[in-house]
Image (cartoon, helix red, strand yellow):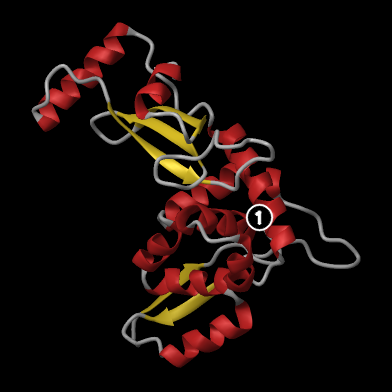
């Protein structure tokens, strides 16, 4: 019977290998037991072994992309064990943050999913976000040369039959708690408090510009006029 060894994500400062039979179905009761004893971080590792699509659905990225991010920021977000408790692994810090991005769940909800206190999750998300910004800021750069703009326009024309286009743009209202003494500054037309994400992509869905933080009450045109784009 054919076997395959799959390397699981780092946990408790060590990597381990798990062998599984590709032809054998994974019993649902085993999944439930695993969830009850290990929490979401561990079960997603096993789900990754079974179906990579399950991992992608949970974190909105592939295991390869996850590992790439972990390699980039792992040393920055890692913490040392103390005499009182073992540190939360970098992989789990990244996992809980990505799940927060993917689902928009509250820290209270994530606390039950990952079996980490909401206070700790709050710190993890803030630290991981800062690490991601520092590590990835060079990956999203606005095109500056005429040649680059012409190349983007050519791609839109060749791929989508859309001439004279240098980017596809859209915005997203990101729900927030109203800042103290902000009044209705962040209250949008959809009747909730938000900040606005404005982004532009090229013909291949690659980001060429992104701006986030504009007050939710500002119109689409106002957000565009206030942007560097």
Q: Residue at x 72, y 66 (%)?
A: 117
Residue 100 sits in quarter: bottom right
- Closer to the camera in the image, 213 or 51: 213
Residue 62 sits in quarter: bottom left
Q: Residue at x 43, y 53 (%)?
A: 64
- 33 vs 136: above or below: below
Mark 1: few, some, or many residues within 10 Å (few <14, many ≥20)?
many
- 35 vs 16: above or below: below
Q: Is residue 168 left or right of residue 125?
A: left
- Closer to the camera in the image, 41 or 115: 115
Residue 200 screen position, x and y as percent: 34, 28
The residue indicated by pointer 1 is 90
- 85 vs 2: above or below: above
- 9 vs 32: above or below: above
Q: Is residue 188 left or right of residue 100?
A: left
Residue furthest to the front in view is 183
Residue furthest to the top in view is 146
Residue 37 sits in quarter: bottom right
Q: Is residue 39 left or right of residue 104?
A: right
Q: Residue at x 40, y 40 (%)?
A: 189
Residue 162 screen position, x and y as percent: 12, 25
Which quarter of the figure is the C terminus placed in? Answer: top left
- Closer to the camera in the image, 154 or 110: 110
Q: Do we see residue 139 in this rendering?
A: yes
Which quarter of the figure is the N terminus placed in? Answer: bottom left
Residue 209 screen position, x and y as percent: 40, 25
Q: How many marks?
A: 1
């Amino acid at each position: 019977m054919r076997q395959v060894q799959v390397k699981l994500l780092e946990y408790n400062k060590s990597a381990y290998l798990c062998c599984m039979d590709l032809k054998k179905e994974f019993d649902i009761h085993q999944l439930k037991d695993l969830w009850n004893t290990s929490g979401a971080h561990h079960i997603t590792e096993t789900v990754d072994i079974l179906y990579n699509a399950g991992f992608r659905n949970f974190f909105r990225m592939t295991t390869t992309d996850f590992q790439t991010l972990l390699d980039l920021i792992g040393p920055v977000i890692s913490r040392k064990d103390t005499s009182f408790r073992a540190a939360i692994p970098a992989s789990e810090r990244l996992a809980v943050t990505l799940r927060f991005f993917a689902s928009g769940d509250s820290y209270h909800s994530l606390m039950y999913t990952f079996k980490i206190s909401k206070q700790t999750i709050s710190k993890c998300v803030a630290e991981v976000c800062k690490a991601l910004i520092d590590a990835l800021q060079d990956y999203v750069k606005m095109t500056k040369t005429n040649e680059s703009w012409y190349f983007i326009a050519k791609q839109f024309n060749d791929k989508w039959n859309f001439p004279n286009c240098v980017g596809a743009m859209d915005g997203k209202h990101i729900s927030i708690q109203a800042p103290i003494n902000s009044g209705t500054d962040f209250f949008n037309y959809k009747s909730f408090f938000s900040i606005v994400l404005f982004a532009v992509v090229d013909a291949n869905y690659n980001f060429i510009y992104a701006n986030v933080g504009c007050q939710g009450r500002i119109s689409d045109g106002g957000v565009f006029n206030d942007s560097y784009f």
